[in-house]
Image (cartoon, rainbow, N blue to C red):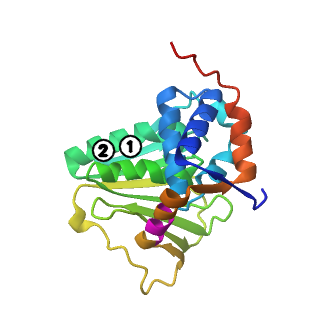
Amino acid sequence: MSDETIHLSYHELVTTTHKTLEALGFRRSDSIDAAETVAWQEQHGLNGVEELAKSLGFLWRETEAHLEVVYEGGCWRVYNAQGASILSVVGIALDASVADVQSYGLAMTRIEACHNRALIGGYLNRCARRGLAAMAYWRNRRDANEVHALCVSPELDFPTLRIYQSTPLNGGNHDLVLMLSSNLECWPRQSSDGDSRIVRFFTPEDMRRAHEASIENGLNVNADAWHKLCRLSSGVLVPEKQ
């Protein structure tokens, strides 16, 4: 993709992304949730449109994807997404995790063999709005040495994102690990001091500045990725108003 950008409003981004996913066969509720999380990523400087555009060529095969249960016990769940995007399956996993938090105060979930892991942020933000702290860990699809850790908390208006240098695994490089908790006292403090493994650290203040800029000036998204979404969204028929 080129570095050229195009200027959009939040409403334009959500509407077009929603239509794109409907054109690919996503259920209306899933496409709305996914469109909002893509927009949330863009508002916080996390390139949601580019991440979505990478998978447009095969998302149409995943509209009926479902999670295979590998293990369920207490507050721990393991699912296999069978190669599907988290946009297709993560909603069900998070609903189960929220129920586990209500029962145990903590929920641990691993979703194996999934992609679009970097788009988890908007979904976790909804957990924070429900009074829960949440973390997600995943490995970079291009560089398995990089581990991304995104944290949200109802105590903070904005999330943190750390990128660590780590040793690649023999397996599990396409997994997403989620942790939810209602006990904020046991949640780690958001600091990068003294940890030499961290190669990039996005603080809540970094996220705040990106969000405020998007509110004041609109969004600048990758032009090539945006045109891909627009070509697909044109295939959706908009019902006429009565």
**198 and 168: which one is in front?**
198
Dot label at residue 223: none
Disc 1 on helix, strand or loop? Answer: helix
**186 and 72: which one is in front?**
186
Gap between marks 1 and 2 measured at Cα: 6 Å
Which residue does the numbered mark 2 point to in the structure image? Answer: 98
Q: Position of residue 168 (x, y in %)?
A: 61, 67
Q: Residue at x 39, y 78 (%)?
A: 191
Quarter of the rendering containing residue 167: bottom right
Q: Residue at x 68, y 46 (%)?
A: 53
Q: Residue at x 33, y 45 (%)?
A: 97
Q: Position of residue 109 (x, y in %)?
A: 40, 49
Q: For the magenta stretch, what is the residue range? A: 206-211
Disc 2 on helix, strand or loop? Answer: helix
Q: Is residue 210 magenta?
A: yes
Q: Position of residue 181 (x, y in %)?
A: 28, 56
Quarter of the image that includes the N terminus = bottom right
Could you classify mark 2 by the number of other residues whose Cα lies within 10 Å: few (under 14), some (14-19), or many (20 or more)?
Answer: many
Dot label at residue 94: 1
Quarter of the rendering containing residue 98: top left
